[in-house]
Image: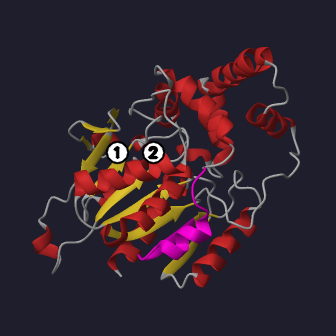
Amino acid sequence: MTAFDAKPNAPWKYLGHDVYSVSSTPANTFADTYQKEPPAVLLVHGFGASTDHWRYNIPVLAKSYEVHAIDLLGFGRSAKPSELNYGGDLWKEQVVAYVNERISRPTVIVGNSLGGYAALAAGAALESQSAGVVLLNAAGYFSDEKFSAKPKNFNSKLRQIIGSGLSRDLLVKWFVYPLVQRLIFENLRRPGVIRSTLQQVYIDPTNVDDDLVESIRRPSLDPGAFQVFRKVFQARGLQGKPIDQLFNELKAPLLLLWGDSDPWLRDAKAKQEKFRSFAKKASLEFKEVLLKAGHCPHDEVPDKVNEEMLIWLQD
């Protein structure tokens, strides 16, 4: 069984836009196994990914828990409207609305990368409806971090140039930048480039297969996909609350799962230490596990991630 076998949920809209989600439930009843109903589990993907990225997790978790996965607006099979301000606040509110309207009971929210930020922010906002948060190489920033560091390579410089702008000239602003961004977008969605990028992100590229590449390529062909890319590319951050503030607001248990060889997180070891330090300062009930993997451990080493999540969920 794969995540593609998970059942698509009934149509649901957020802010008037279609949101795609899937779910799967245990074959046995909750009463057969638990003294009380366990929490639901909601999986939130990272940048460029979708519900398909949980293909190796849903079947295992759904043996014991009601599991949902959602495509954030702008990604996967969800709508990609150009007028939205894409970022942490939008995706947090989308996740909160989904839990309240479609699950309607305490939920453990699991997120990877930018989905990790959305999971944490939603977990903090949901209060009693939050049964826990699991972060897999989560994105985000801390209140003491600065963003004025000089980029070290061409790609970083190009991103800063496009994101911040060098000129107020309208020809540059409205023609050159979009043109350059379009060229970058067209290159990034080529199957060969997607595969090559994933092979750099996964320490063990075994699971970088045709299904994974297609799951990322397909949504990039949707109307509106380029405009989403432009907005996310130019946002220069998730534009939500800093991680340390969210830790102070979170009232639920926290599980930190790190792909310990993540090539996408700048100063990954230092980032892990900050998560650990601020979680302690917030007096959170948390557990941390380091895994031999890259940025997406749930898909690279799914057996280990599933094992750690199930142990934590059952504690």
Q: For the image shown, how many numbered marks are present on the structure?
A: 2
Q: In the rendered structure, are the residues bearing label 1 and label 2 in contact, judged by CB atoms less than 8 Å apart? A: yes
Q: Which residue is mark 2?
A: 53
Q: Nearer the viewer, residue 293 or 71?
A: 71
> Does 107 sit above or below residue 73?
below
Q: Is residue 45 magenta?
A: no
Q: Is residue 253 magenta?
A: yes
Q: Residue at x 60, y 65 (%)?
A: 243
Mark sitting on residue 3 = 1
For mark 2, does the 10 Å Cα neighbourhood hold few (<14), some (14 to 19), or many (20 or more) residues? many
Mark sitting on residue 157 = none
* Mark 1 vs mark 2, CA separation in Å: 8 Å
- Which region of the structure is painted magenta? 239-257
Residue 56 in view in this figure = no
Residue 255 in view in this figure = yes
**Which image quarter is the C terminus in?**
bottom left
Q: Earlier in the sequence, mark 1 or mark 2?
A: 1
Give the secondary structure at mark 1: helix
